[in-house]
Amino acid sequence: MLTRFLQCVAVPCLAFAVAAASAHPSPQSEVLLEGRADSVHAQVTLPLDELALALDRRPAEPGPDSALVTDVQLGAYLAAHIRPVAPDGRAWTVKTGDVRWMLRQRPADVVASLTLRPPAGAPLDRFTLNVDAIAHQVPSHVTIVAMRGRGEARPRVVGTLRFGQRSVAVRGADPRWWIGSADLFRLGMAHIAEGADHLLFLLTLLLPAALVANGGRWQGYGGTRHLAANLLKVVTAFTVGHSLTLLLGATGAVRVPEQPVEVAIAASILVSAAHAWRPLFPRREAWIAAGFGLVHGLAFGATLRELDLSGLRLACGILAFNLGIETMQAVIVALAAPLLVLLARSRFGTRGRRVAILAAGAAAVAWVVQRV
């Protein structure tokens, strides 16, 4: 009888506890960042009950009867547990402003305003934010870090800190939309300099640029003007193609899975190699460059989209990144042009060109197999 009675009591209690848990999810901390001219404003929202666990005493609204933790004490606590760090390891200064006690809502919150200021010479746009106001004592606690830029109606999530995670990298906090353009320009240059598949496609397509197609074969040097015209047409067409899809991809207007794009890029090298061996589409290289440029631009756009830019910062970032790509591309083509002339005029030119074609084709096949 006693066992049956306990079951009758325990089952409804358990059901009530499950229903209560599902109806009231565990509260979370929120840190909302907004960039200012020389600082970053942070609005920190902390659930009161879990903050009490972290403090091992309950903070309460200051009053004559209960003031276990004052605003000053809580401000000092937050300044010690919300720590921005510059890329070179120097700590930012943290100053606590207003503290509001949201006691009438359930669950109750504490909302504090903080001013985060970088050390001299440190960038406002890049820092690491360490947050452990509650998580160092409550392992199950979740902290969401978000940022709202100038003119943005909704904040965007920068990171979600769960068990074992205490820091998140913050980018784009500077409200000036042109800040970071130099970094994106260098990123565009590096993307081409380090992107062997993009370079190999373009250089393989340009291998016969100094030659004249005749009778289904590449025969004879066509002259400096012929080479310059071919270089200009192919490079311009490739630029137009990848710039279009870079714009669409970076803005999120077009989203294509990464694997088929990477496979198509490797396949584009195979097509270029086949054309460099024997003219498949003479005097139409620009169209091929533009078509495959659309594919290569999707990869460029995916790289830029990961930075999560918006508004004027996005527009400026796309321009700077693309200019970096074009600058490095122009440098490489300028260095390759004299070699193409020497290759076309040398009696060993055909043999040298075919060795380069076979090497490019082998690399393309290896990439296709790897990416598939």
Image: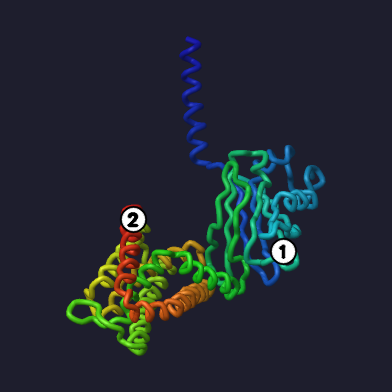
Q: Amino acid at mark 2?
A: Ala
Question: Residue 252 appears in which quarter of the rendering?
Answer: bottom left
- The residue tagged 1 is 118
Residue 178 in sight from this viewpoint: yes
Element under label 2?
helix
Q: Helix, strand or loop at disc 1?
A: loop
Image-based side of 188 in relation to 103, left or right: left
- 295 up-or-down from 24: above or below: below
Residue 177, image x, y percentages: 58, 74
The reply to whether residue 253 is in sight is no
Tell me residue 184's x, y (percent).
54, 70
Q: Residue at 26% across / 68% down in the picture?
A: 274
- Amino acid type of disc 1? Pro
Q: Residue furthest bottom?
A: 225
Residue furthest left as drawn: 215
Q: For the residues marked 2 and 1, what is the alpha-carbon distance in whole angstroms?
A: 47 Å
Above/below status of 369 relative to 326: above
Q: Position of residue 263 (x, y in %)?
A: 32, 59
On screen, residue 214 above or below 172: below
Nearer the observer, disc 2 or disc 1? 2
What color scheme is it? rainbow
In the image, what residue occupies the spot 28% across and 75% down? 288
| Residue 179 place in picture, x, y as percent | 60, 73
Left or right of residue 56: residue 369: left
**Residue labelled with disc 2:** 366
Assess disc 1: are there few (<14), some (14-19) or many (≥20) residues with their C-alpha within 10 Å of its C-alpha.
many
Q: Quadrant of residue 364?
A: bottom left
